[in-house]
Image: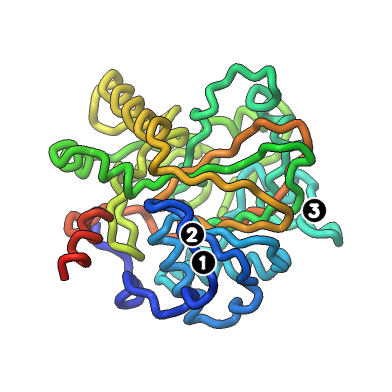
Amino acid sequence: MAPPAATADLQTPADTPTPYKNFDVTNVIGREFPDLQLSEILHDDTKIRDLAILVSQRGVVFFRNQDLNIDDQKLLGQRLGELTGKPETSKLHRHALSNSKRGIAVDENGKLDDEVSVISSDQARKFYKDRFGFGTRRIASEGWHADITFERIPSDYAILKIIQSPEDAGGDTLWASGYELYDRLSPAFQKFADGLSATHYQPNFVNIAKEFGEDLIETDRGAPENTGIDFTASHPLVRTNPVTGWKSLFGAAHQVDKGHIDNVTDYESELLKGYFNKLIAENHDLQVRFRWGKNDLAIWDNRSVFHTATNDYQGKRQGNRVVSLGEKPYFDPNSVSRREFLASTAAA
């Protein structure tokens, strides 16, 4: 499938926001701006566009103690995608379960908003009891995922601002680079993976709705295509990021745990899913870990990273997440891997 229309020359950002103090957290993934307030650049389209490109290149970018209010956070979430060419019909995601129907306010004025998913430890402990507490026997690496890939039009960028970090230690989030995961495959395996697709499936929402009597958002969850409660979609196993032009492993981790790799046997599908999970869980050099403080904020590109929470705390943790919708996932056979791109620029 051909890539969607996008602005020209996205792979090379201008000089902003790099003049602000920043550092790479690891060689592969993550950058932090310890002093920049995003409110200072929020209405500068050039800087926001360059920030979007940087996020797509580095996977995830961190900002400390931000003063953005929830309306600003929503504006930023939409502009990141708009300024890098996402379809006009793609808006902010309205989460089927984590929405205003849960009655959790997104600000101190009691505002409820379907376009904001409140990440609440209280709600998570209610719906997902087996994931929390020191007595859990759940394997932590089972939590790796990218946001809402079960939608026909899934996410491009996500922004999470932690309003309350746990009183005790813990609650870190980890991200893993889908670019580097693809580069860990052998050339022969890459060629094989390039031609596959995977069915993403999320049955938990319907199960929770039945168990707890919760209502789900069933129509127009931010894009006309995101309708219904089957919560299943087939996407390329290897996805081209339209901003960088790089290939990323996409059909892996929790989002395909209940789904499958298409057009292979069930046994082959389980082998492939297990191998991809192993690549994510056992390669800490393609991961980055972030310890949250109050009002810290992270922006990541769901097309090219996986992430997982660390449920190792007893206190309360709450944040506001805004998830932008992007393009229909596609694979461009002319796209390159991150390593190939870096090698070509080094040789130039």
What whole-number distance in Å separates the C-alpha atoms at marks 3 and 2? 30 Å
Q: Residue 332, image x and y in percent?
A: 23, 56
- Is residue 199 among the parts visible in the rendering? yes
What residue appears at the point 70 percent right and 40 percent down from the top-left corner?
215
Q: Which residue is mark 2?
A: 31
Which of the two discs, 3 and 2, labels the residue nearer the N terminus?
2
Q: Is residue 150 left or right of residue 166?
A: left
Quick check: marks 3 and 1 in contact, CB under 8 Å?
Answer: no
What whole-number distance in Å separates the C-alpha atoms at marks 3 and 1? 33 Å
Which label sits in the foreground, 3 or 2? Answer: 2
- Which mark, residue 105? 3
What whole-number distance in Å separates the C-alpha atoms at marks 1 and 2? 7 Å
Q: Which residue is mark 1?
A: 22
Q: Residue 290, image x and y in percent?
A: 57, 47
Q: Neighbour class for label 3 at 10 Å: few (<14), some, many (≥20)?
A: some
What residue appears at the point 48 percent right and 70 percent down from the top-left corner?
51
Q: Residue 245, image x and y in percent?
A: 28, 62
Q: Is residue 304 left or right of residue 288?
A: left
Quick check: marks 3 and 2 in contact, CB under 8 Å?
Answer: no
Quick check: marks 1 and 2 in contact, CB under 8 Å?
Answer: yes
